[in-house]
Image (spheres, rainbow, N blue to C red):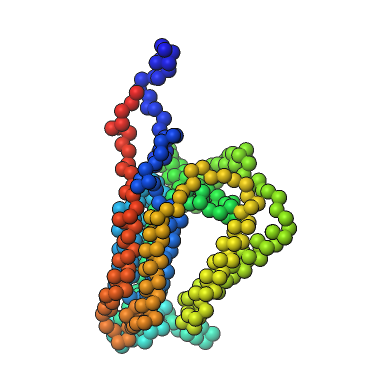
Amino acid sequence: MREARGSERPGLARPRPERGTPPAGVPVPRSRRALHPGAWWLWALALGTAATRTTNPLLLALLITVSGYVVAVRRPHTPWARSYGAFVKLAAAVLLLRLAFAVVLGSPIPGTHTLFTLPEVPLPDWAQGIRLGGRVTAEGLTFALYDALRLAALLICVGAANALASPSRLLKSLPGALYELGVAVVVALTFAPNLIADVRRLRAARRLRGRPDKGVRGLVQVGLPVLEGALERSVSLAAAMDARGYGRTAEVPPAVRRTTAALTLGGLLGVCAGTYGLLTAAGGSYGLPVLLAGLASALAGLRLGGRRTLRTRYRPDPWDARAWLVSASGAAVAALLIVAGSLDPGALRPGVVPLEPPTLPLWPAAAVLLGLLPAFVTPAPEAARDPRKEPTT
């Protein structure tokens, strides 16, 4: 008994499981289970699809607000969840860059309201159709703003998926045929913050020693240690993965391999053709059937391809009713905006000639609000732990 009591050293905290993971043997309440990461990606991609169907700035701002609110109330307290701010900054940079191109290179939209005139640079005959400088109109800037806001909304929706879905849990949910590709992506996303931290640490160390950390010389002297550390981590990771049997494959008959390749390749081509048909006005009749057929073929190929990958899943994430609700809410937003674009294209794509303020269509705006459903049907994230307030033994 004395040995058992003496084994607990005072002042040392007991090891705790990873945040969000219950201890072994303790069941997780159904209402507190984290949502399947695939449901978050389907919801975000559906909102991004809805953003591509309109250039109305009011609807796009509403889509951005909906995704931002869901991220604000359901984002977990983890390092990878902080990527949403980077996507917002990227969207703002894309918006400003598009407006700068419209000012410098001009716009294809003719306008009558001249804001200012830049000195125009004469170009040779082979550069017909391109101009540098010249007259900048309000109609051209408005058209560039609408177009850039659509791309910014798409980037923010993708950033919402990155902030809400755990990369490791998403990797665990991938089919066996995509497991190796998913591992490469997750490792790249995990090592990127380490490279940034190494650069900051080395630059701070050089400043403390009174050495330059800027310019070509500082970049070379900082880049070499960073590259060396990245290679060491890569070698250690490769050794650990090889020791755990990564890359082991099973014997698959040649007929199954050929069938898998044909289904996967044909399915991906069908997805590309169907997506092109949905994004263009001429392919509206065949776009959706080809896209569905391509998805079915690609999923069948991935299902067959998973036979050659031998792996098991520890505590797989269930696809429950909440995952269906979240995915259905995003799909409903995308479907209703596609229908609204075919019934009343002027409301979703307002013109800029003549220049008029955009109006907010009521029922498409109500359809966008369906994207708020994940904020009410998914569990709230756990509060961040403060180690100073936790008792020690």
Residue 124 seen in the current view = no
**Residue 389 at what x, y percent from top left?**
28, 32
> What residue is at 44 percent from the left and 34 percent from the top?
25
**Residue 310 at what x, y percent from top left?**
62, 47
In-front residue for pair 136/165 = 165
Screen quadrant of the C terminus: top left
> What residue is at 36 percent from the left and 70 percent from the top?
149
On the picture, is 221 further left or further right than 241? left
Q: Is residue 4 above or below residue 341?
A: above
Outermost residue toward the right in this view: 254
Q: Is residue 33 above or below residue 108?
A: above
**Residue 239 at what x, y percent from top left?**
61, 39
Q: Quadrant of residue 261?
A: bottom right
**Residue 27 at what x, y percent from top left?**
41, 39
On the picture, is 168 further left or further right than 135? right
> What residue is at 56 percent from the left and 69 percent from the top?
294
In-front residue for pair 206/139 = 139
On the picture, is 85 further left or further right than 266? left
In-front residue for pair 26/40 = 26
Residue 126 seen in the current view = yes
> What residue is at 63 percent from the left and 57 percent from the top?
304
